[in-house]
């Protein structure tokens, strides 16, 4: 019996999601999965215990072209379907996600390592954005403007953009795709999804869900899937003129590559890149509230969220009290199998992530840092560590670099201006928070001279963004926005239209010609 088959029998919920021992890595429609024979097989390893869950046949160049052509062909028809009818199909996608929330949430946990409660939460997020998109399908509004010319009407309208390429990271293997795909679908676009090769099974399971829904509506090719290595499939996507928009989530280095390639061909991009998120804790803060928020923000998903709390900027008067509270809280964190409902922190995604964390901590002392808790590799199978709390003098070189692991840097400040400066002086600009009872502090933090991040919160943590607001950040975070608010406009093309219903031809600006 192979290792992967043993895992399949151990986790019976995989079969319910359509996951087999060997799975195809390309899908162009409900009845159009690529053949896996002769393909390079990717072993999918669970970070829980290092076992092989299943195998995936990596896509070939031929598979890639077939998937893109299917998305192109489907776009010609899909863009003509009325938006509310597109929304009705997405409503059925939401229903199917709701039906399979438990097994899909468990798969997120099994493949990525986040605790099962967060796995369920990720599927819930996909359901929420689908529901949001259903309502949005009747609200793709354009403005009506007043023309300066008599007997003219001027307005703007929004049309579908084309094929959208979605490149997602391992840490949110379902939710981030849904932020893009659900909204883009009601906008009339078709999608090509390239998931992380660390979490391909979640994408395959979602594709099976989409295929069933689309088949029931007599369609296909709206949502397509291509699984392959970034150096081959990812490079082709970002340079492919057939793809109108690339939405990419990952490291800042990867984002620069995407930006360069899409800019050369004048295509659009949405970049959701690194985060180095801080919480300012003022001298008047509710420390019970702040401690709970910091714990969830820094330990949740084992520190592998883009919105993970990585820095605490604490007022010097309360920093010792806050650190003591954090250490006591960290000591109570249950580390272990994330499928166990009593576990608070699961493993890192792979051994490379563990090594990166250990290396970062080893370099602390040379930059004035001091570990006050954790930072140890745990023995046994799986990629487990203890979350670390580190005292640092400020934003050292190491602190300014995002380490995708549960390392929490704590630094002091004296004045609110000092705190805001420390918050802003790192290269990244995703999420930020302040805990204070002072209206002046809160308003200054939220003002134009306050936080320079795309997300700024008061008395809540940096993690846990709701889908109703636009998600994204500034500076090295890339500037992209996904999910709610008016993010939908990125997936459509704007057209300004003027209609002359008179018998004259007046020119704008009062120009007389001829």
Image (cartoon, grey):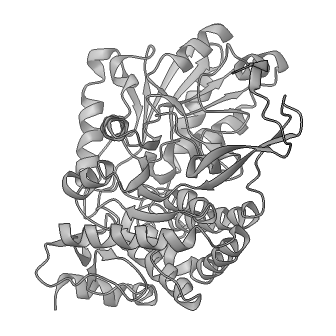
Up the image or down, 193 lies above or below 253; here it is below
Q: Position of residue 385 (x, y in %)?
A: 34, 49
Up the image or down, 101 lies above or below 114; here it is below
Q: Going by the image, does 479 lie left or right of 46?
A: right
Residue found at the far left of this picture: 38
Residue found at the far front of this picture: 514
Q: Going by the image, does 64 lie left or right of 476?
A: left
Q: Position of residue 339 (x, y in %)?
A: 46, 71
Q: Report how many numbered discs are placed on residues in the image.
A: 0
Report if residue 10 is visible in the image.
Answer: yes
Up the image or down, 394 lies above or below 21; here it is above
Q: In which quarter of the image is the N terminus?
A: bottom left
Q: Going by the image, does 174 lie left or right of 459?
A: left
Q: Determine which quarter of the picture holds residue 80.
A: bottom right
Observer-nearest of 171 and 168? 168
Up the image or down, 106 lies above or below 481; here it is below
Q: Where is residue 212 in the image (x, y as percent from the top left)?
A: 51, 87
Observer-nearest of 403 and 486? 486
Observer-nearest of 64 and 397? 64
Q: Where is residue 24 in the image (x, y as percent from the top left)?
A: 27, 80
Residue occupying image coordinates x 42% and y 69%: 71
Observer-nearest of 345 and 96? 96
Q: Determine which quarter of the picture holds residue 499.
A: top right
Q: Determine which quarter of the picture holds residue 45.
A: bottom left
Residue occupying image coordinates x 46% and y 89%: 16
Report if residue 284 is visible in the image.
Answer: no
Q: Quadrant of the C terminus?
A: top right
């Amino acid at each position: 019996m192979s290792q992967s088959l043993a895992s399949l029998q151990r986790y019976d919920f995989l079969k319910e999601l359509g996951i087999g021992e060997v799975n195809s890595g390309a899908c162009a429609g409900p009845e159009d999965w690529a053949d896996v024979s002769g393909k390079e097989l990717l072993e999918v390893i669970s970070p829980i215990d290092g076992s092989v869950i299943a195998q995936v046949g990596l896509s070939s160049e031929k598979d890639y072209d077939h998937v893109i052509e299917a998305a192109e062909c489907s776009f010609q028809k899909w863009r003509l379907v009325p938006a509310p009818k597109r929304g009705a199909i997405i409503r059925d996608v939401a229903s199917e996600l709701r039906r399979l929330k438990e097994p899909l949430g468990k798969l997120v946990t099994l493949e990525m390592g986040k605790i099962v409660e967060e796995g369920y939460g990720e599927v819930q997020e996909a359901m929420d954005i689908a529901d949001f998109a259903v309502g949005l399908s009747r609200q793709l509004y354009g403005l009506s403007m007043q023309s300066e010319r008599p007997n003219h009407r001027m307005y703007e309208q929004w049309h579908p953009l084309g094929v959208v390429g979605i490149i997602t990271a391992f840490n949110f293997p379902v939710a981030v795709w849904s932020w893009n795909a659900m909204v883009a679908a009601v906008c009339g676009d078709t999608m090509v999804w390239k998931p992380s090769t660390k979490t391909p099974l979640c994408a395959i399971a979602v594709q099976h869900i989409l295929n069933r829904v689309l088949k029931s509506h007599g369609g296909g090719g709206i949502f397509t899937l291509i699984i392959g290595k970034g150096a081959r499939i990812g490079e082709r996507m970002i340079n492919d003129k057939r793809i109108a928009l690339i939405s990419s989530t990952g490291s800042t280095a990867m984002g620069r590559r995407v930006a360069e390639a899409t800019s050369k061909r004048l295509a659009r991009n949405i970049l959701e890149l690194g985060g180095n998120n801080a919480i300012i804790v003022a001298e008047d803060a509710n420390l019970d509230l702040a401690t709970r928020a910091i714990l969830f923000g820094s330990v949740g998903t084992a520190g592998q969220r883009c919105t993970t709390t990585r820095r605490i900027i604490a007022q010097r008067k309360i920093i010792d009290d806050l650190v003591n509270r954090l250490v006591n809280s960290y000591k109570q964190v249950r580390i272990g199998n994330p499928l166990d409902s009593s576990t608070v922190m699961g493993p890192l995604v792979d051994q490379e992530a563990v090594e990166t964390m250990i290396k970062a901590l080893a370099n602390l002392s040379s930059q004035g840092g001091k570990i006050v808790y954790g930072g140890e590799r745990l023995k046994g199978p799986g990629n487990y560590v203890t979350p670390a709390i580190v005292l640092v003098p400020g934003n050292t070189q190491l602190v300014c670099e995002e380490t995708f692991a549960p390392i929490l840097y704590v630094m002091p400040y004296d004045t609110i201006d000092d705190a805001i400066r420390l918050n802003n002086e790192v290269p990244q600009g995703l999420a930020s928070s302040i805990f204070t009872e002072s209206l002046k502090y809160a308003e200054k933090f939220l003002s134009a001279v306050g936080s320079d991040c795309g997300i700024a919160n008061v008395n809540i943590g940096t993690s846990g963004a709701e889908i109703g607001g636009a998600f994204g950040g500034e500076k090295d975070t890339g500037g992209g926005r996904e999910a709610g608010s008016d993010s939908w406009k990125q997936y459509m093309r704007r057209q300004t239209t003027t209609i002359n219903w008179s018998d004259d031809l007046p020119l704008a600006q009062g120009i007389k010609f001829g």
